[in-house]
Image: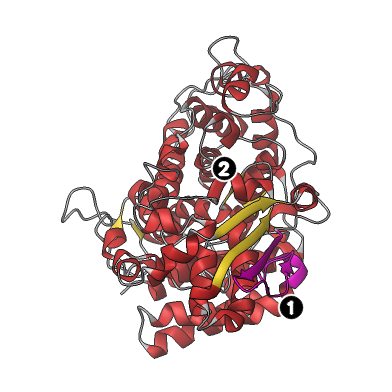
Amino acid sequence: MPILSPQKDSSKYDQVIQDIADYVLHYQVHSEGALETARYCLMDSLGCAVLALGFPACSKLLGPWVLGTQVPCGARVPGTQFCVEPVKAAWDIGATIRWLDYNDTWLAAEWGHPSDNLGAILAVCDHLSQRKLALGDKPLTVRMVLDAMVKAYEIQGVLALQNSFNRVGLDHVLLVRVASAAVATWLQGGNRDRVMAAVSLAWADGGALRAYRHAPNTGSRKSWAAGDASARGVQLADMALRGEMGVPTVLTAKQWGFYDVLFSQTCADQRVKGKQDQKFHFPRDYGSYVIENILFKISFPAEFHSQTACEAAILLSPQVQGRCAEIDRVVVTTHESAIRIIAKTGHLENAADRDHCLQYIVAVALLYEGLAVEFYENDFHRNHPEIDRLREKIEVIEDKYYSAEYLDPEKRSIANAVQVFFKDGSATNKVEIKYPLGHRRRRSEGIPLLLEKFRANLYSRFPPDRVEALFNIFREQQKLEEMPVNHLMDLLII
C-alpha cells in the first residue's frame, strides 16, 4: 500500500497519539515471558473462535457482505471456508473470538479483552502473507503476529489502567479500535505520520455506547462489538495508508475534541458519584506489562468479575445439594466494579443478559456444581426455574478492601466470597477466593488446563488429526514463531 500525503508537521498531534505511534513503530519485544504468554493468548483465542461457530446466532453473521464474493489473497476466517477481504475478516474473527465471553481479559479502571485485536492482526497478517507469496516474497511468520499482539494488548491495557470510559457511558471497544488501527498501520509498513493519522481517526469516531451491555437493552451486539471495532481499525489503517489526513488534536481540541465532548468532568459528574480528570492518565510507559499480566478464562465462560465467585460457589455446591428449599439467603461479597457492571436483579432477557449477571452465575454454580455456555441459553433457563428462585435469595455487598486490591497494580486481585445461610440458622463457611485460576499468580496451575481447554474447543470443529497437529504446534514456542502465517491459517480452515 503506498504511503501518500504526509502531514507537514507531525508535532501538532496530541502527545497521547505521538506516544502510541512511537511505541508501535520502535518497541522491540524481547521479553520471553511476553512472547510465551502471547502464544497462549493466540492459542486460547483461536479455540474460543472455533467453539463459537457451533452457535447459529454467531455463524449467521459471518462471510462476505455480498454472498459469493471471491477475494484474491483474501484473509481466512478460522473454522470456516470463508476467504474475504481483510476488513470483513477482522470483523468475523473478532466476533467469533468474543462471542462466548470466553477469551482473555484485562481489568483496571477500564476493562476489556485485548485479544479482540486479533481480528485485525490475523486478517492483516494472513492477507499480507498471501500477497507476498503471490509476488514471490517470503510470507510473514507467526512471530510477527505475536509482536503485534504484545503491542495491541499494551496500547489497550495501558490506556485502561487509570482511565474509566465506562464511567462516562462509553464502551471499552473504542480502545480496540485505537489499538487495532495502530498495529494494522504498522504491520502494513506505515510510517510515524501514517500511524498517527490512523490512530487520530480512530479517536475521532468517538465511543460506542454501553447500552447494549445493560438492561433493558442487553443483547448480542456485545458479542460482535469487538469484531466491529477491530474491523474499523483495519479500515482506518487502510485509509491512512492511502494518504487520508489525520485529526491532530482530536483529543484536546477545545469544545469539539474527545476530552471536552466525551470525557469531560461534567459528563462524569452527571453519571456517577466521584470525579475523574478531563484527560488521560498513564501510570506507566508502554512495554509488555499488559500481556504478561493478562487474565485467562480457563474453567468458566463468565464475565471476569464473577470468576472467583463462580469458583467459590462450585466449592460450596456439595453442601447445598438437596437443600435448596432450606436456603434463607446467599451472601456474595465482592468489589465495586462487579457491583457496577454485573450485579443484576429482576428479569433477565436473554443469554447475553445472563452471562453478565453475578447472581445468575453464582446460582447456577451452586445448583449444578459447574458452569457451561449452554447454561445461559433460553431453553436451559426455561427448564430450570429453580435458578431464578435461588437468584432472588442472593445478596451482593461490597468489601472496600477487595475494591482497593482490584486496583492495586501489584495485586490486581478479582476477589469474591460466597456464603450460604439456611433457614434453621446454620450456614456454610465463607469461601473467599482473591485470584482466579487465569491470574498470573496461578499460571502454573492454570496453563495445563488452558491447553486442555484449547484441545477440547478444537474438537468441536476439527477432525482428530487436525486437532493434534494444531495442539502440538502451539506447545512449541520456536516452532510456532517460525511458522508462516498462511500455513497456520491453512490448518485452521475447513
**Residue that badge 2 annotates:** 179
Check disc 1 and give the amino acid type. Ser
Rendered residue at 32%/50% (across/down): 85
State the image coordinates of residue 407 (x, y, percent, origin top left).
Answer: 76, 47
For the residue pair 358 and 58, the one nearer the viewer reads as 358
Q: Residues within 10 Å of mark 1 (few under 14, many from 20)?
A: few
**One can see residue 25 in this view:** no
In the rendered view of the protein, which quadrant contains the C terminus?
A: bottom left
**Between 132 and 231, the one nearer to me in the picture:** 231
Please name whichever residue, 472 or 366, is drawn nearer the observer in this view of the structure.
366
Type of residue at label 2? Ala
390 in magenta: no
Quadrant of res 274: top right
Q: CA distance from mark 2 to mark 1?
A: 29 Å
The magenta segment: 415-442
Visible residue check, residue 163 = yes
The residue shown at (37%, 79%) is 460
| Residue drawn at 54 percent across, 74 percent down | 326
Q: Is residue 429 magenta?
A: yes
Farthest-out residue, bottom: 465
Give the answer, above or below, for where 176 lies relative to 474: above
- Name the one closer to the observer, 239 or 47: 47
Which residue in the structure is indicated by mark 1?
444
